[in-house]
Amino acid sequence: MKEMLPLNEQDIKKLWKHLLPTILFPFVAAGMFYAFFLVFFKDTGFFQDKIGLYMLVGFSVFFFGVIAYMIWSYVIDLRRGFKYRIEGKITDKELRVHTSTSHSSGGKTGSSSTHSSTTRHYSVEIDGVQYSIEQEHYGKLQVGAAIIIEKAPKSHVTLFLEVGKTDELPPEKSIEADDDKRKFLSSTPRKAYFTQDDFKALKRGFWGKAKFRLIALTVMGLLVVPFLVGKMQINIFFLFPLMLIAIYQFWKFNKEWRLYYRNKQYAYKEGIPAIVQDKSKYNRSNNVKTSGGTIRVKDELYAQLNVGDKIILYKPAKGNQILSITTAAHEEIYVM
């Protein structure tokens, strides 16, 4: 449910609390940039070089344009004088991380630099509709919980947030549900012999990791071997870090191969009872938090799992990697 409400005194204070630092920030940033260029580029002719000057102007326009848009959004919210109140159930949440790298050249100075920046966008889905959320609130949210959130329409600032419990049952029913979950979690792990699908899933899980190890070993070998067979053995000293990486990758590959071979010989899996506690998306991966740990799953399985579901996590005889999951609907879906 979404409704429009007027801003109260506390909301106006919160918007001003965001607006004032945003107004002051460009002046502080301009002073810092000026001091930086005065110290490091005063005698380099940077400002006389057209390329450097164009880069500086372009960056300044972009930077101050973003700040101006932020200031404008806060001013619009204050002038409009209303907010949106959204009430419903959290159906999903997502964290998207984007890293960008830019390269710049100093023109006549001949200097160059590389700059990387990482942005994080947090969002929550309420009854199927996605809303942006600040990082400070994201950790408090749990899929399945009731939520009341008030947001400014233009700046999307969260003015109020209240999160309820995922279990909305009456006290007596809640106690029964908790007892049922405890009995389920304390039940005896189930053992089952491997099927052909289990062997295939186990192989997929091993080769999914082994491919990366083998590629890394091949690249390291192509870099190191020419120095060994040629007359440049002395340069091996400088490649010592690469050799350490190669040794580590070989050790991991050998360890994973031995684990795969042992599980193939034992040929059985153990089902451990677990409860789904939360789930979220991280870039392109789907993470499901259970009482038995956090698992990455495919879209099909992610859509079927809900908070509070009683599931079975099947692991091979050795190791902690999840082989498959039996859902609340008693359907077994492979994770590997």
Image: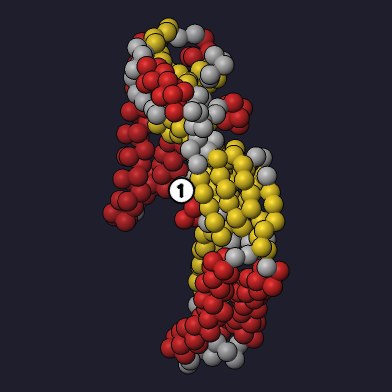
Note whether residue 10 is visible. yes
In the rendered view, would you say 59 is above or below 142? below
How many dots with numbers? 1
Residue positioned 59% across, 39% down in the render: 89
The amino acid on which the numbered mark 1 sits, given as a three-letter code, is Gly
- What SS does tag 1 mark? loop
Give 47 or 20, whichever is nearer the viewer: 20
Can you say which quadrant of the picture contains the N terminus? top right
Q: Name which residue lies at 46% across and 32% down.
A: 277
Q: Residue at x 46, y 23 (%)?
A: 173
Left or right: 16 as drawn, with respect to 224: right
- Compare residues 186 and 334 and report the one nearer the observer: 186
- Residue drawn at x 51%, y 76% as measured from the top left: 21
Q: Position of residue 66 (x, y in %)?
A: 63, 72
In front of the other: 179 or 130: 179
Residue 146 vs 197, above or below: the answer is below
The residue that mark 1 highlights is: 139
Residue 145: x and y in percent read: 53, 38
**Horizontal and vertical percent position of residue 169:** 50, 28
Q: Residues within 10 Å of mark 1 (few under 14, many from 20)?
A: few
- Figure colour scheme: secondary structure
Q: Is residue 38 above or below residue 243?
A: below
Q: Which image quarter: residue 152?
A: bottom right
Whether residue 106 is visible to the viewer of this picture, yes or no, is: no
Nearer to me, 42 or 142: 142
Residue 218: image location, x then y, percent: 45, 39
